[in-house]
Amino acid sequence: MSFIYQRSSALFQEAKKYIPGGVNSPVRAFNAVGGDPVFVERAKGAYLQTEDGHQIIDYIASWGPMILGHAFEPVVEAVIKATEKGTSYGMPTAIETEIAKLAVSMAPNVDQIRMVNSGTEACMSAVRLARGYTGRDKIIKFAGCYHGHSDSFLIQAGSGAVTFGSPNSPGVTQGTAKDTLLADYNNLEQVADIFKQNKGEIACVIIEPIAGNMGCVLPKEGFLEGIRSLCDEHEALFIFDEVMTGFRLARGGAQEITGVKADIVTYGKVIGGGLPVGAFAAKQEIMNHLAPLGPVYQAGTLSGNPLAMSAGLAMLTYLNNNPSVYDNLAAKTEYLHKGIDTVLSEKGMDYKINRIGSMMSVHFTDQEVVDFASAATGNNEWFKKYFHGLLDHGIYLPPSAFESYFLNDALSYEDLDKTIEASREVVAGW
Ligand SMILES: *Cc1c(COP(=O)(O)O)cnc(C)c1O
């Protein structure tokens, strides 16, 4: 069986003339796997309809938001209804309070939430708030964790003796880089050392409490708890970036799953139901520092947009009322994990599968994947062959070895069986 994506390739050629690299976000361009990206015409449930006329099974769910499948009826209806009433006012609306009230009732340990338009904006604003609240400049982040593309986060480990980072994109200044300190995921000792070397200077630690941007990587026992203690000891804030995990792993996200309390939590993806939404939330005492109440400035013309809020509210309402979705998704993900596990182990290949809830990733390596360095030991040639092999069978995996699969609840066990069977056929010839 082989799906051909000829029209997608033609559309990509045209797109490249007018859009840098033909895409509006780099990972879509297939740079990590080679070949031309697939263009989508529409989507419903677990399936993408490509411009080539193929129906393919989707494992990225728009990188997370479409947890209930594409064009989920209650969300579509809510957005249509809202659209008829006007698409933006730049004035307060009742629905903003409604979704805020619901979101803080689902998320542990927060009193208030501020809506923005992307996960990037949420993380950028959360760090500003932490700096404004503590009166300190430096932040600690972890290699392999993604917090959007604002300057403070586009930092890689510094060389040699320096403890601060260096820009990993032109356009990020050395001045910005020196305030971001880098640690390895799951290395608590290193975090403790950084705190010791920068006494009284750390505003916050920001982390993906369960990482999804170096594949799926879980925190080791005691890691998050240890950072929590360090933050308390040094009076720094602990920011959970739950843009990926929020409302996906549980109603209360990674805070609920891990039992570790964050001081500020950022959201995105699921909270917008597929529309451009981000958010950050905290206790009242911290949020009081935010404009217009306090001096930390943050704003947005389209923040709390009525279309976006109606989509998010429909999504969160469904998840809040149907928590069994999380168990169903976890069961489906476990089923897929076991199926692929069987296929790859029969083949005698080096691989590691990481999984939690509806997130999982397959790494072609013999090492445990616990941080960015171990994720990077994966054999990318195998990954590319596996990705394109499945795409030829009409199955869409994330087009990078450093991304997690995001399962959606519209996936049937038949879809999962098809995926496992396709995996078997793909690796058969290796
Ligand atoms: C996707 C993501 C972001 C960035 O969100 P955008 O909406 O793409 O700006 C930030 N943090 C994490 C953990 C993410 O997965």
Image (tube, rainbow, N blue to C red):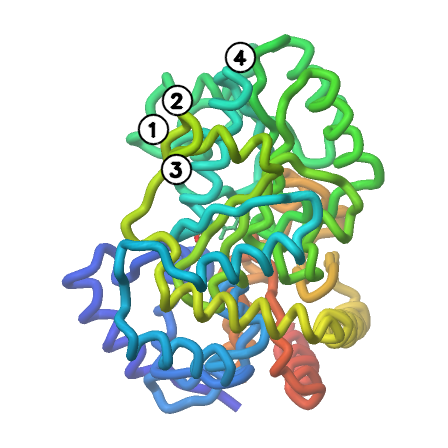
| Amino acid under disc 1 | Val
Label ID, residue 150:
3
Q: CA distance from mark 2 to mark 3?
A: 11 Å
What residue appears at the point 49 percent right and 68 percent down from the top-left corner? 273
Q: CA distance from mark 3 to mark 4?
A: 22 Å
Q: Position of residue 62 (x, y in %)?
A: 47, 67
| Amino acid under disc 3 | Ser
Question: Residues at badges 1 and 2 in contact (C-beta under 8 Å)?
Answer: yes
Q: Mark 1 = which residue?
A: 172
Q: Position of residue 253 (x, y in %)?
A: 68, 55
Q: Mark 4 = which residue?
A: 162
- Side (left or right) of 228 relative to 241: right
Neighbours of disc 2 within 10 Å: few (<14), some (14-19), many (20+)? some
What residue appears at the point 46 percent right and 44 percent down from the top-left corner? 122
Q: CA distance from mark 4 to mark 1?
A: 18 Å
The answer to whether residue 11 is above or below residue 277 is below
What residue appears at the point 53 percent right and 47 percent down from the top-left corner? 113
At mark 3, the secondary structure is loop
Q: CA distance from mark 2 to mark 4?
A: 15 Å
At mark 4, the secondary structure is loop
102 or 36: which is nearer to us? 102
